Image (cartoon, rainbow, N blue to C red):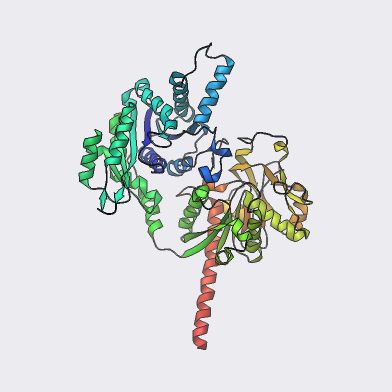
Amino acid sequence: MTKYIFLTGGVVSSVGKGVTAAALGKLLKSRGFAVSIQKLDPYINVDPGTMSPYQHGEVYVLDDGAETDLDLGHYERFIDTNLSRVCNVTTGQIYSEVISQERRGDFLGGTIQVIPHITNEIKQRIGLVPRDTGAEVVLVEVGGTVGDIESLPFLEALRQMRSDVGKENTFFIHVTWLPHIGATGELKTKPTQHSVRELRSIGISPDAIIARSDYPMGEDLREKIALFCDVEPKAVIPLTTTDVLYEVPLLLEREGLGQYVLSRFGLQERRKPVWDEWEQLVAKDRTRRPSVKIALVGKYIELKDAYMSVREAVRHASLAVGVDAEILWLHSAELEKGKGWQELETADGVIVPGGFGSRGIEGKIAAARFARRNKVPYLGLCLGMQVMVIEFGRDILGSEDTNSTEFDRNTPHPVIDLMPEQRGIGNMGGTMRLGVYPCVLVPGSHAGEAYGVPQVNERHRHRFEFNNNYREVMAEHGMAFSGLSPDERLVEIAEITDHPFMVGSQFHPEFLSRPNRPHPLFKAFLQAVAERAARRNTAEAEEELSDRAAA
């Protein structure tokens, strides 16, 4: 029988349910169980694909093309399992399906209600996870906090599931926040007590409470929470904020959460968890390493979660290369106004990530020009590849009107154009080129050397592509097309041949980077960044010695 672990949140949002779910999944997988994780999102959008990054943060794309919540990135990075579209469910999906059934007459004239029709559909979606993934343990995270109106149908469905699948097959974890009162220097449990009372008022009693805080929680508070919230003291798990995200599984392991969950399910671990690699990862993150600066030139940098996977991919690669990467968050629209250039000029590498729309595009193009002319390592992701092509096209064609038809429909040189299969599409949601596609690599290129294999599969999210009418002229002037679709129709990777490392990918490599297995393109980029930083440091040291000698 499939075991279900349900995670709810209390007191405040952004308390860390997603990372907690991912870390617990890591604990159970390390004990030999097949694990999958699902996110239930209360918003009425069908998926986050049409939502502003300022509203939602990053849109995380899966192998099957599902546009999902950024928490699924945490899930995949921690449990190292590629998830599918059944792992992200929204209120919009639920209501769309139930209304479609009603329009077809599936309910035979019955009155459609939240209970049982909406809750039945939610439970049916949860049941798809073990069926489609083969998971023995399914973790289900409910977005938002207890008390939100939007979450009530999901919580009611979870309450019903305890009866449907049996109490012995369900486990409820409530993640709460312990605020710190600066005037008295105390952590307060009262908000947690109120949150649990709210949860119990709708029929759910937590089996464990994870108490998040910025300061260590004493044993007295553990006993107090256990007493007032009706759980065992060992089921109150303190989780203090850590400076290393990937330490969370280790913290939960030390508190015995994995073993406690298995004991409540009546299960025995199939193998002893081995944490050597994970501990080394955390230790390496805390080790002093040579510093490098990477300019991330984006359009949504006010909300850094919009580039969550890019940031984590940089972290993974920097650990593998042995450097400490400081990200300089530069707004492309500000570069257009002449602001931020001093910071850009101090960077050892430049990343231009994905995005949509014309705002800030000239700033991204200017960043690509700076990287090309000054031989600064450059990694372009999706739109980042396209602006690299536009900048190169303007240089070799001698026309500042060279552009993408996304930004200028009447450009005389559309080096980036709408994909043929995208023409005539009216709806925005879920209609791009989405999901995993193969890419054939050219041996001896930067990309080919980075991957070390002839073909790879990468995740995409775009409508526009390189215009093949310009492939020959660009190749003649020094742009190599080092990654192509198997039919050679689509340019997947472009790079500048007379440059230490200037590579752009039409896909999003950041989605496949893992803490202990960094993505090859990010690793190769960080290696080039580290080499440039070392050369610059050596040159500065020699210049300083020369100045001292002259003095």
Q: Which of 501 and 297 is in front in this view?
A: 297
Residue 447 at what x, y percent from top left?
Answer: 61, 53
Looking at the image, residue 156 sits to the left or right of residue 305; the answer is left
Residue 214 at what x, y percent from top left?
Answer: 33, 51
Q: In which quarter of the image is residue 270?
A: top left
Which residue appears at 50% of the width and 80% of the height?
544
Residue 360 at what x, y percent from top left?
Answer: 63, 54
Q: Nearer the viewer, residue 212 or 129?
A: 212
- From what the image shows, is residue 72 above or below residue 388? above
Looking at the image, residue 292 sits to the left or right of residue 395; the answer is left
Q: Nearer the viewer, residue 388 or 109?
A: 109
Which residue appears at 49% of the width and 85% of the height?
548
- From what the image shows, is residue 364 above or below residue 28? below
- From what the image shows, is residue 350 above or below residue 437? below
Instruction: Decide if residue 166 is in sight here.
Output: yes
Q: Quadrant of residue 12?
A: top left
Looking at the image, residue 498 sits to the left or right of residue 513; the answer is right
Number of numbered tags placed on the structure image: 0
Q: What is the residue that sits farthest to the right in this orientation?
A: 412
Residue 272 at what x, y percent from top left?
Answer: 32, 41
Q: Nearer the viewer, residue 101 or 135?
A: 101
Which residue appears at 21% of the width and 36% of the height?
227
Instruction: Decide if residue 494 is in sight here.
Output: no
